Image (cartoon, rainbow, N blue to C red):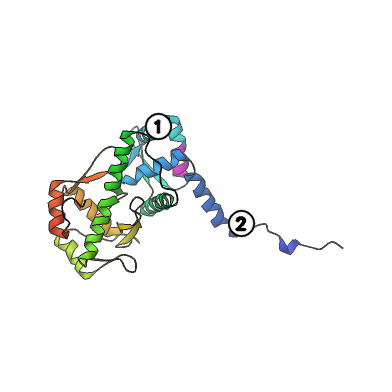
Amino acid sequence: MAQDDSHHSTRPSPHRSSPARRLAALAALLADETRASFCLALLDGRAWTAGELARHAGVAASTASEHLGKLVAGGLLAEERQGRHRYVRLADTGTAHMVEDLAAQVATAAPPGPPRSLRAASASSAMARGRTCYDHLAGRIGIVIADAMTARGLLRQDTGFALTEEGLGWFGALGIGLERTGRRPLVRSCLDWTERRPHLAGVAGAALCRHALDAGWCVRIGSERAVKITEPGERALREALGIERGTL
């Protein structure tokens, strides 16, 4: 006699499968190299036009527009229009952290091969030395600053990142406001995909990066996310954190 296996059915219910379906949709969005390239470029925290992203990825404008439409519809990008121009940026800080974290995991699992040209090698080296990760400092610069803050008792890294009372006072002494908005944490560790160690993110990381750029401690270089410390920046960081020249 045939056995009734209906109670062993593996057909998922719509409710149970929805998280899996959303995860699969997200993975599909980032599985395309052009779309992944767009998301990585937008980690500079700025808004780009479709044309700029097309040139960055080396694709036709029509191709870029199609991919951007999918990223916006999928909730990874937000768009705004100013006149004839269409600007896009990462949807929020959570999206930026996800993209950076995924990039870090990929770098750990499969280190990149040698650059294909001298120009690519120079750009890669500059990005490793210092860059913005959406709205905070990353690369060697970000790690050195986080380590210096920890050595001075301004930041704790033992159980995740946390600012000490001295750290809060340090930000105040520099005139850097730490205004919390929404659910964003005051401090957060963000795994650096080149150094493979955490750097400072969250409200404090964003405020410090903004101050460093506004005060001329560092400047953007090239067309991507790379930044470099200026001479005034070296002096300021030596006074503020005891960071010696040549370590950045």
Left or right, residue 88 beside residue 26? left
Disc 1: which residue: 58
Outermost residue to the right: 1
SS of the residue at dot 2? helix
Q: Position of residue 92 (x, y in %)?
A: 37, 51
Q: Position of residue 172 (x, y in %)?
A: 17, 63
Q: Position of residue 164 (x, y in %)?
A: 24, 69
Neighbour tally class for label 1: few under 14, some 14-19, many 20 plus, Cα within 10 Å:
few
Neighbour tally class for label 2: few under 14, some 14-19, many 20 plus, Cα within 10 Å:
few
Left or right, residue 174 beside residue 225? left
Disc 2: which residue: 14
Which region is colored magenta? Answer: 67-73
Prevailing secondary structure of the magenta residues: helix
The residue located at (18%, 50%) in the rendering is 246
Disc 1 marks a residue whose amino acid type is Gly
Disc 2 marks a residue whose amino acid type is Pro
The residue located at (44%, 38%) in the rendering is 34
Q: Quadrant of the N terminus?
A: bottom right
The residue located at (39%, 49%) in the rendering is 91
